[in-house]
Amino acid sequence: MPDDQDDVPIRVDHRDPATARAWLEDTRLRRPFRASFRAAFCAALAPNRQLRILELGSGPGELAREILLRCDVRSYVALDWSQAMHDIANEHLGDLANRVTFIVRDFREPTWPAGLGIFDAIVTQQAVHETRHRRHALPLFERARTLLAPGGVLLYCDGYLVDPEAKLAALVLERGDQPRVLERAGFVDVRLLHDEGNLALYRATNPR
Ligand SMILES: C[S@@+](CC[C@H](N)C(=O)[O-])C[C@H]1O[C@@H](n2cnc3c(N)ncnc32)[C@H](O)[C@@H]1O
């Protein structure tokens, strides 16, 4: 998809294998609290059985690993546009990788949901801003909702705006807008589950 004029250009391209590995090392050092978010994702999914899960921007598979180990998962689709990230995820998951369907696809393309099937849960961590402008969050959520069964949930975690003067400010939503955009996309019962290190995790439900 061609960049819209005010989209923020990509500076860190996770499709490059060295960049993908460097990102993972850096984020493990700088954001150790991501483990608390993974625990919160799992706690939100744990009451459910035989989950069909889609992860958007699945990256190195850290979240997939926790969910596969701690939750009752029937199927797990990991979508990312980076084969390099899928390769890292394969290593990280070991035998668990056999339970994952890896899809290379660009979620900025309006047709990204085509043929993926129906899910009980869609999970995403630190990836929605990769649409390269906060205004793309709404269409991404709207399209994601078309893939959810009635009563299915979106677990959405991403950074929120802290410094409006920051260079990359246009990438992320304001904190108060994160739940509002989920509601505008048609989700109900939008709940904040965890907020730490300028990242927030929400659960949003597809109406029955
Ligand atoms: C900051 S990383 C986060 C990875 C993972 N969710 C995590 O938290 O460990 C962002 C991920 O989004 C993926 N990504 C970026 N742009 C994308 C796009 N247009 N379509 C699909 N995936 C994309 C990158 O390849 C990368 O794996």
Image (spheres, rainbow, N blue to C red):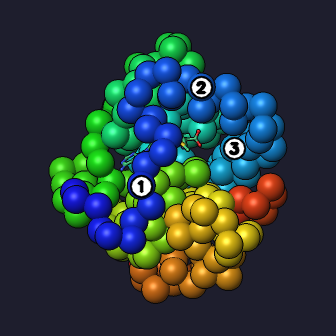
| Secondary structure state at the residue bearing disc 3 | helix
Q: Are marks 2 and 3 in contact (CB under 8 Å)?
A: no
Relative placement, left or right, of 6 versus 125 is left
Q: Residues within 10 Å of mark 3 (few under 14, many from 20)?
A: many
> Residue at label 2?
22
Residue 80 in the image: x percent, y percent?
A: 38, 40
Residue, disc 1? 9
Of mark 2 and mark 1, the one earlier in the sequence is: 1
The residue at the point 43 percent across, 49 percent down is 10
What percent of the width, then of the height, locates residue 66?
Answer: 64, 34
Image quadrant where residue 26 sits: top right
Point out the tag, 1 or 3, that comes first from the N-terminus.
1
Determine the residue positioned at 58% across, 51% down: 126
Instruction: Say whether marks 2 and 1 touch (CB < 8 Å).
Output: no
The quadrant in which residue 195 appears is: bottom right
Identify the residue at image location x=45%, y=67%: 133
- Circle 1 crowding by C-alpha within 10 Å: few under 14, some 14–19, many from 20: some
Circle 2 packing at 10 Å, graded few (<14), some (14-19), many (20+), is few
Circles 1 and 3, Cβ within 8 Å, touching? The answer is no
The amino acid sitting under disc 2 is Ala
- Expressed as whole percent of the image width and height from the top left, the position of residue 197 reads 80, 55
Q: Amino acid at mark 3?
A: Arg
Q: Residue at x 44, y 61 (%)?
A: 8
- Give the residue pinned by disc 3: 38
